[in-house]
Image (cartoon, rainbow, N blue to C red):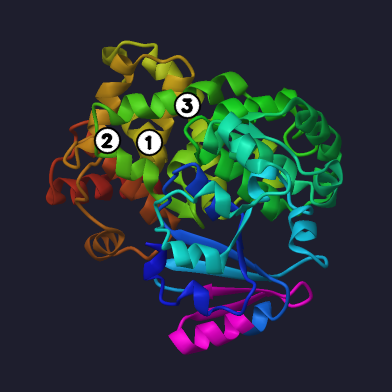
Amino acid sequence: MLEKLPFDLSSLPQPAYLVGGWVRDRLLDRNTRHLDLDLVMPSGAVETASSLARSHRAGFVLLDKERQIARVVFADATVDFAQQVGSTLEEDLGRRDFCMNAIAVNCQDLSLRKISKTASIPPDLLIDPFDGYTDLQAKLVRMVAPENLLDDPLRVLRAYRQAAQLDFTIEPQTQAALKHAATGLSRVAAERVRTELCYLLAIANGAKWFELAVRDRILVDWLPAEKLNLARLSQIETAIASLIEPYPQLADFFATELSSDRSVRVVAKLAALAHFATTLEPLGLSRIEQRWIVGLLRYLPQFLQFLSLSSASISAKEQYQLFDKTLEFFPALAALALASGALLTAVQPWLERWLDPNDAIAHPAVLIGGDDLITALKIPASPAIGELLTAIRLAQVEGIVRDREAAIFYARVLYEQQVR
């Protein structure tokens, strides 16, 4: 509830205005998990934020000294304070991206009405010089001005992302301006582009809007269309859902964060998007994301080939070797296979092996370790130890080795053959 914030909005120096996403979402009766407020003040924004943080023992971050922007972080809320740009609030709002985000409310008026976090805002409280409220009712993303898009080309990607989030359409003149402003995206830092694209892909219908951005040549400088597999991307969300329905425990797997706030689901979509892992290099993904994507795209052809064969024609050794290389990301590989046209009935036996921690092929028990081999065979540590352990696991999968004693014996025979 807004009135349950650890400070009273009416206690802020006046005037102070709530703007942007929170106002938009309340007008849409759209709930969010975390309370994020954006406040604009004609003066003293940073000083007000600093004083508020001190008095309430909250976190304080100076985001931009030159532009006088600061953040106060509470346990269940984040509040950004920004100095008004221009001599009037209307001038400040006129420099924003889209009309639906250029609506303000006076904090004093809002506090007097006791508006809750989840309640809508009465239209008579709105300061709306660009008629953004009408756009919200029409479900329309409309620019404030073309030059605002040119000033920060990342706003081009935000248009597609917010249209996806809100299930809006982009107004035709705005779409034309987005195409023109997209040429400036080549100058935007990779981190900002990556974050915005991953936000888009995290949305359930994000693939549709991603495809539209590609068709509009918005991403030509980052992800050229000829290097993308849009057909597979269009199917990956359905593929993931078709896995989670019979195996609900996979919901946690796909929700797991791999890097920053990017989940396995997003990384699977990135892998679905690209023909080759090198296509995504301009985005500067983290090492773990790169490793997953390289592995997914490397082993997908082999997995698809196996799925086209009868299970009897694939040896236990071949199955084990595929699991050994893909174990950490196997459900994502299964989703990519489905998005590539494989049948769920073909994928399920493999997935059930992965889900069973006692499966002898996907998860063979560890019978012996490297130190055990060094002691039992009286041999020095060397790369040969790893080779012997691999050989033991393969023999174990094939039923040749079943216990620790047999593993040591098998390793001794192999080692003696090697040193002869």
Closest to the camera, between mark 1 and mark 3, is 3
Residue 227 visible to the viewer: no
Q: Amino acid at mark 1?
A: Phe
Which residue matches tag 1?
A: 330
Q: Are marks 3 and 2 in contact (CB under 8 Å)?
A: no
- Tell me the element at label 2: helix
Q: What residue sits 43% from the left and 59% below the top?
A: 115
Vertical comparison of 40 with 104: above or below: below
Q: Neighbour class for label 1 at 10 Å: few (<14), some, many (≥20)?
A: many
Q: Quadrant of the N terminus?
A: bottom left
Mark 1 or mark 3: whose residue is earlier in sequence = 3
Q: Which residues are magenta?
A: 48-72
Which residue matches tag 3?
A: 236
- Tell me the element at label 3: helix
119 sits left or right of 279 in the view = left
Q: Which mark is residue 341?
A: none
How far apart marks 3 and 2 lie (CA) works out to: 20 Å
Q: Nearer the viewer, residue 347 or 381?
A: 347
Q: Nearer the viewer, residue 228 or 109?
A: 109
Q: Neighbour class for label 2 at 10 Å: few (<14), some, many (≥20)?
A: some
State the image coordinates of residue 32 (x, y, percent, origin top left): 43, 51
Q: Are marks 2 and 1 in contact (CB under 8 Å)?
A: yes
Q: Nearer the viewer, residue 10 or 38?
A: 10
Q: What residue sits 84% from the left and 39% below the top?
A: 181
Q: Neighbour class for label 3 at 10 Å: few (<14), some, many (≥20)?
A: many
Q: Amino acid at mark 3?
A: Ile
Residue 391, by quadrant, is top left
Residue 305 visible to the viewer: yes
Closest to the camera, between mark 3 and mark 2, is 3
Q: Which mark is residue 354?
A: 2
Mark 3 or mark 2: whose residue is earlier in sequence = 3
